[in-house]
C-alpha cells in the first residue's frame, strides 16, 4: 500500500519514523494527521479485515518460504488516505512500550477530530522478517489489536470505527532489507464513511 498522494505530511512522517525512531514520535501533529486521513470520500469499500487476513494466509500457503516473493497488495486500498506511524512494542510481544503512549494519544486526538466524524479505519500492523511468516501474522494481529484497544480505552475512540488487521511480513516496505526497522510500522487507513447521524445526533450505520 502507498500513502495517499495528497498527504505530504504523512509521507514526511513516514520518512522521519524510519530514520529517527523515538524522536519522530514527538513530531506527530494530530491536526495534520486528521487532515491527511480526511482526504477521502465515501468509497463504499467492500473489502473486509477478515478477507485481508485470509489473503495473508493464502499468500503464505501459495508462496511458501522464509520470505514473501513480493509484497502482498490490495488494490482497493491503494488510493485511500492513510497515515503511517511507528509504535514500539516489547520484543516478541504485543505490549506497547511507554515511549509510544504519546503516539497513541496523538492518533486518538486525530480520530476525535470533527472532520473524521463517522469515518471507519483499518489499523494495520506490519512486522519485519525476524521470526516465521505464520508467527509474524499472529504477532502483528495482536499488536494491531493492542493499538485498537488502547485507542478505545482510555481514549474513547468509537470501537465500531476501528478494525485491526495483521499483515505480518507480507508487505515489507524494504524487501531488500527484510529485518530493517522500517518494515515495523502501523498504517491507519480511512475506508470511508461508516456512521451517519440523525437530526437528534443519534448514530447509525450508513445505508
Image (spheres, grey):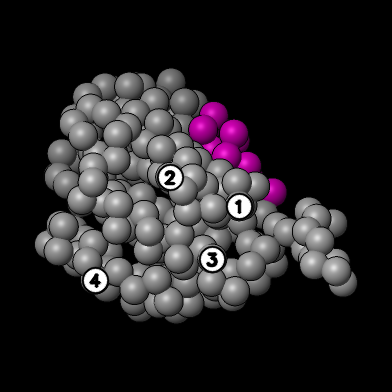
Which portion, as a residue range, is magenta? 46-55
Q: CA distance from mark 2 to mark 3?
A: 14 Å
Q: CA distance from mark 1 to mark 2?
A: 12 Å
Q: Nearer the viewer, mark 4 or mark 3?
A: 3
Q: CA distance from mark 4 to mark 3?
A: 19 Å
Q: Earlier in the sequence, mark 4 or mark 1?
A: 4
**Quick one: SS at disc 2?**
helix
**Residue at point 34% right, 42% down?**
126
**Quick one: SS at disc 1?**
loop
Q: CA distance from mark 4 to mark 1?
A: 25 Å
**Residue at point 29% right, 40% down?**
96
**Quick one: SS at disc 4?**
loop
In terms of image quadrants, where is residue 19?
bottom left
In terms of image quadrants, where is residue 49?
top right
**Circle 3 residues within 10 Å: few <14, some 14–19, many ≥20:** some
For this orientation, the residue located farthest to the front is 154
For this orientation, the residue located farthest to the right is 199
> What residue did someone put label 4 on?
27
Disc assigned to residue 57 = none
Q: Earlier in the sequence, mark 2 or mark 4?
A: 4
Q: Nearer the viewer, mark 2 or mark 4?
A: 2
> What residue did someone put label 1 on?
158
Disc assigned to residue 112 = 3
Main secondary structure found in the magenta portion: helix
**Residue at point 78% right, 59% down?**
203
Q: Nearer the viewer, mark 4 or mark 1?
A: 1
Q: Which quadrant, please, contains the C terminus?
A: bottom right
> What residue did someone put label 2 on?
150
Q: Is 47 a magenta residue?
A: yes
Between 72 and 38, the one lying in front of the other is: 38
Q: Earlier in the sequence, mark 4 or mark 3?
A: 4
**Quick one: SS at disc 3?**
loop
Amino acid at each position: 500500500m502507498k500513502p495517499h498522494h495528497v498527504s505530504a505530511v504523512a509521507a514526511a512522517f513516514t520518512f522521519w519514523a524510519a530514520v529517527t525512531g523515538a524522536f519522530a514520535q514527538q513530531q506527530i501533529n494530530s491536526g495534520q494527521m486528521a487532515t491527511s486521513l480526511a482526504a477521502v470520500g465515501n468509497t463504499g469499500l467492500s473489502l473486509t479485515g477478515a478477507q485481508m487476513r485470509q489473503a495473508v494466509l493464502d499468500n503464505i500457503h501459495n508462496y511458501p518460504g522464509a520470505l514473501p516473493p513480493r509484497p502482498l497488495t490490495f488494490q482497493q486500498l491503494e488510493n485511500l488516505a492513510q497515515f503511517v506511524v511507528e509504535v514500539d512494542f516489547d520484543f516478541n510481544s504485543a505490549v506497547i512500550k511507554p515511549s509510544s503512549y504519546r503516539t497513541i494519544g496523538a492518533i486518538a486526538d486525530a480520530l476525535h477530530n470533527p472532520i473524521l466524524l463517522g469515518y471507519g479505519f483499518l489499523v494495520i500492523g506490519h512486522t519485519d522478517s525476524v521470526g516465521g511468516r505464520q508467527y509474524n501474522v499472529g504477532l502483528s494481529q495482536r499488536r494491531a489489536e493492542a493499538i485498537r484497544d488502547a485507542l478505545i480505552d482510555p481514549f474513547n475512540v468509537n470501537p465500531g470505527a476501528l478494525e485491526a488487521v495483521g499483515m505480518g511480513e507480507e508487505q515489507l516496505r524494504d524487501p531488500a532489507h527484510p529485518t530493517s526497522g522500517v518494515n515495523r510500522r502501523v498504517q491507519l487507513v480511512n475506508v470511508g464513511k461508516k456512521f451517519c447521524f440523525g437530526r437528534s445526533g443519534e448514530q447509525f450505520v450508513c445505508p
